[in-house]
Amino acid sequence: MATTEEIAEAYADWRVRCNGNPRLAKMLRGWNRTVHLMTADDAGHFTIVVTDSVLSELRIGLVDQPDLVVSASSEDFADLFWGDLNPSEKYISGEIVLAGSSEDVMRLDAMSMVAFLDQ
Amino acid sequence: MADVDKTADVVVVGAGCSGLRAARDLAAAGLDVVVLEARDRVGGRVFTEVTEGGAVIDQGGQWIGPTQGHLQALADEFDVDTFPTYVAGANVEVRDGQRFEFTGLVPTSDPGAAADTVAALLELDLLAQEVSPTSPWTHPDAAALDARTLADWTMEAVDSPGARNLVSTAVLAVFGCEPVELSLLYALAYAHSGGSLSSLIRTTGGAQERRFAGGAQQLAIRLAEPLGDRVVLDAPVVAIADDSDSVIVTARRARPDGSRTDWTVRCARVVVAMPPAVQSRIAFDPPLPGARDQLAQHAPMGSVTKVHAVYDRPFWREDGLSGQLVADRGALRAVFDDSPEDGAHGVLLGFIAGHADRALEAVGPDGRRAVALDELARAFGPRAASPVEFVEQRWSAEPFTRGGPVACFGPGLLTSAGPALRAPVGRVHWAGTETAEAWTGYIDGALSSGTRAACEVIAAEGRGRP
């Protein structure tokens, strides 16, 4: 199990990489969404806000109404943010679950995959 | 009135999955149905063969995926089991003649190309969500989307040549044609009809997720069984004459001595359940309206050959490989593990599609076998060069399909003639997976199109379901 601090540290690293990636800037243009992260093993809940292709800092707790909810183990969240885990494989296997409109799910799937590939 | 050989309420032309489904629904509504099939078998583009060595090979449509409810319901009804396509282990990518391994959907040897490919798939999936699968011509930008090919879009929207190649590989595997042959509007509508382009190209979670134990054709055979001798094989339909009171359908039926004779059926309505390109080889009287005939003229089939290499065991699994191959050029751009569920022997299935399929026509079966085995050996090692058996199914050479897996609509067709696709012409109704409103091009779409055409006929004939 990853701790809240470990997830926050990994996310901070991922956020820098995502926000500096021109492909992601293009893919996420005009996409403003609130994303809730729920850890299956109860390490904590988090909120990320995407505004004009820019990812916010990780907020602790579930803030506002989400457009998308991502459920996974705390370990998988940390590995995903460190770039050690192929997110599409985890979605397909059902270990990471995305809930939201099909368009939002597609975008999050693709953006996490590009962040993984493009590191 | 001219003498006819038989009378029926409805004639269905084509005993593929769509025609048989239509016939069954019509019979269930109390209508007397005759199905005329050109081949000596039912199933159309769904065709299972057993090799001399006993391997069960699906030469045509073979997969079932999530949301294909019509197909799943039929499999449930007939108690036909499905099992997951083998996906464990690493996939192989061949790029610029070099071999790499990867996991997941997109080959990763060139990370920039992979990221561009994911971005391109997302862009296409988002565009597809805006296009109605049933009436794509109603999109506000339909004319612009239909004025371009998928290749035009790729040249503009995808920067890296590697990603363009991967998009081409996906298109060849899905449509059996090159991106330059496809209207962007058609490709988007087609993708949306199955959910998204991503769902069409996925194995797990997508259109290639599961297979049928014993092959897919048994579903067609089981559909045909209760129809008995109302399914007439070896009877290619050559003419359909609609005199507005009734229709006379003429087939060139085989006689025991091998010669053929015209055989006619008078009926109230006809369901034509075959791809548009081969519909246009039937003589319609009166001639079809211009838009309907031009639609058929402009809707060529994809060009695809399915090759199966059978081995004594699925040796690639021992090397930690899934048997899936994605290649940026060559004959086999996409390969899957097609072994039986118990892995009693190994089978690799490859698609030769588009330009490669046409280019390899001249080299003949031995030439294609040599090319395919060479490419399989490059991907999966020298053992792949020596299969126990090798079979090919050249769909473009099949006289009653002339290609596959599906019709490939070029630019301008949907926005000019699209509404004619399903619209009945007099007493003639249209079925076939090309007319499906969901899962166009798939077995599931064939089934739902058959039901839709049957409903049209039942409504027109004023009969209800019993």
Image: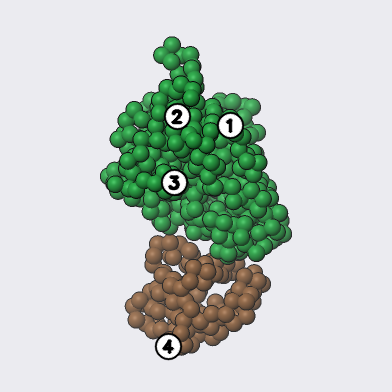
Chain colours: A brown, B green
Tags 2 and 4 both on a single chain: no
The correct choice, above or below, for B274 with respect to A59 in the image is above
Camera sees residue A13: no
Tell me the chain of label 3.
B
The residue indicated by pointer 3 is B460
Tags 4 and 1 both on a single chain: no
The residue indicated by pointer 4 is A61
Is label 3 in a helix, a strand or a loop?
helix
Q: Nearer the viewer, residue B462 or A73?
A: B462
The residue indicated by pointer 1 is B285
Q: Is residue B429 left or right of residue B167?
A: left
Tell me the chain of label 4.
A
Whether label 3 touches label 1, CB < 8 Å: no
User: Pointer 2: residues within 10 angstroms few (<14), some, or many (20+)?
Assistant: many
Spatial CA distance of label 3 from label 2 is: 17 Å
Badge nearest the viewer, 3 or 4: 3
User: Pointer 3: residues within 10 angstroms few (<14), some, or many (20+)?
Assistant: few
Asked where in the image residue B238 lies, by quadrant, the reply is top right
Q: Nearer the viewer, residue B168 or B373?
A: B168
Is label 2 in a helix, a strand or a loop?
strand
Q: Residue at x 56, y 25 (%)?
A: B366
Image spot of residue B223 (x, y percent): 34, 38
Tags 3 and 1 both on a single chain: yes
Whether label 3 touches label 2, CB < 8 Å: no
Whether label 2 touches label 4, CB < 8 Å: no
The correct choice, above or below, for B374 with respect to A42 in the image is above
The mark nearer the N terminus, 3 or 1, is: 1
